[in-house]
Image (spheres, coloured by chain):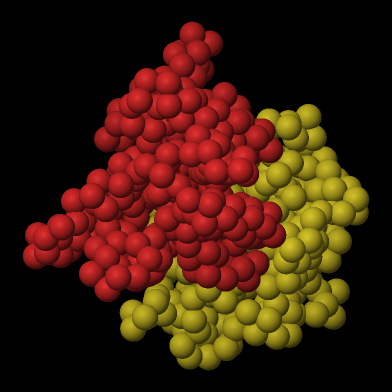
Amino acid sequence: MSWLDSTVHRAMIEAALVGVLGGVVGVFVIARRLPFFTMALTHGTFPGIVIAALLGVDLYLGGGVFGLLVVLAVVVFSRARGQDFTAATGIALSGGFALGVVLVSAQDGFSKDLTAYTVGDVLAVSTTDLVITAGVAVVVLVVMAALGKELLLVAFDRDGASAVGLPTAVLDFALLAIIEVTVVATVPALGAILTVALLVGPAATARLITDRLVLLFPIAVAVGVSCALAGVWVSTQWNVAAGASIALFCGAAFGVAFLASVLRGRLRPAAGVLAPPAAVPEEARA
Amino acid sequence: MTQQQDRTAALVLEKASVAYGHVPVLEELHGTVRSGEAVALIGPNGAGKSTLIKAVLGLVPTVRGRIEVLGVTPAQARRDVAYVPQADTLDPDFPVSVEQVVMMGRYRKIGWLRRPSATDRTLAAEALERVGLSDRAKNRFGTLSGGQRQRVLLARAIAAQPRLLLLDEPFNGVDAVSQHALLEAIALLKQQGAAVVVSTHDLAIAHLACDEVCLLNRHQFGFGPTDAILTPERLRATYGGHALELRGDRVIVTQT
């Protein structure tokens, strides 16, 4: 009997892998202010899952392909005059989810698959799921290491990146595709609704702890892996939902870091939640 | 001026018209900026100063006429052109240090998939030294004052070793210390043979730092030696008749 035959062992490895992925990719999600987009993506993959179930193909392949279509739609719609990225994202979020609901309501017998899809079931991951997640993690980490400085420049100064001749649209699409692939790889563990917790929580927590980019990645990974493993452990000890436990740990980690930064006096003066972002690049509006 | 006639043309505008889509923004621009010279782009808000800079970078198309940069098209010249954006257009919360921002100036020359070499690090450190901010290298970019951030962005451009430097309103809201540091760094770049294009509202700075002036407001209202071009008549024409006051040789635009 192999060590991997244990449900808990497989769950632990899956959790650690998605913890690493969520932490690393999350740093860019936070730096580019993309949590809402990530949220939309998780919902946008929904119709893909339903269609895959109808066609009898792999659910996550269906989600992945449909998610890429959502990414493309957001990129195209956000170029429309008088619109911005968040409007296009909101439409993709609601439209994708609604399409999924319509497809489900037209069909019977989805409920079991659907629960696993929406809130995840890390204790049910197969060895094949593990291999896929590990493969995705390797590809994402290699691509991010290879394009690191270009992704950084586009994130920080879009006009400056265009000015030196970087293909900003291609790099944007690469980043959104990285997020999309990460979402799809994380969904079996956390579910579509809760995946955003691991892609935003650990990196946001790290951002409260440090200002330095080089430290953000290891801290976010450490927080992500810890929350994921703790969630699985709590789930097996008290027989509660694993995905939700992981998401709760992510929230708790952020809460603790937030309190610590309040105590250290590191909060900025209140700007109001509806204050416009400090910098809206001209290109984004044009 | 006679010496400058011999210098090579870094930027040539030949009856160039620039447009976003079908909307013309700038029409019939004509003039030359030579290596070692600085030209000030002066005009009211919305005059098209930033658009001209983007056209020189090849980011906005030239629909008629021609823009030639360092003897080639704007897109072909990017390797030797550096652009300094307004510091306040950048996210002050972005987790990036001052030295990382300066290193971005080297990215083009480092190339894809490669990491900065020792030479890149030395050039970035020297560039930061030139704007007098070596002691802030490890600080997060957003913690610096507006003027200091502008100097860091100039250091980033210096690190790129440009033959043509484009600055978009670098003196806006900048304190006296930073203004002085910016002017000194720009003067040194000129000495080393770079051509400089700087858009500004500040006529005094145009007098101080620039050999030539280009008066812009959709059209060109003059392009030539600073003293010859910055006349009350031309300024009044450029600014659409908004009141101007003259005190000695000083010209004040009361509304921009």
- Determine whether, in the image, residue B229 is placed left or right of residue B194: left
| Residue at 59% in and 58% down | A135
Residue A166, picture quadrant: bottom right
- Percent position of residue A148, x then y: 66, 54
Which colour is chain B painted? Answer: yellow
- Percent position of residue B110, x then y: 79, 62
- Percent position of residue A223, x then y: 55, 29
Residue A71, picture quadrant: bottom left
Colour red maps to chain: A
Residue pushed farthest top? A263
| Relative depth, front residue between A3 and B19 | A3
| Relative depth, front residue between A175 and B243 | A175
Say if residue A189 shows up in the picture.
yes
**In the rendered image of this protein, does residue B99 appear above or below residue B209?**
above
**In the rendered image of this protein, does residue A231 appear above or below residue B46?**
above
- Percent position of residue B111, x then y: 76, 66
| Residue at 73% in and 85% down | B71
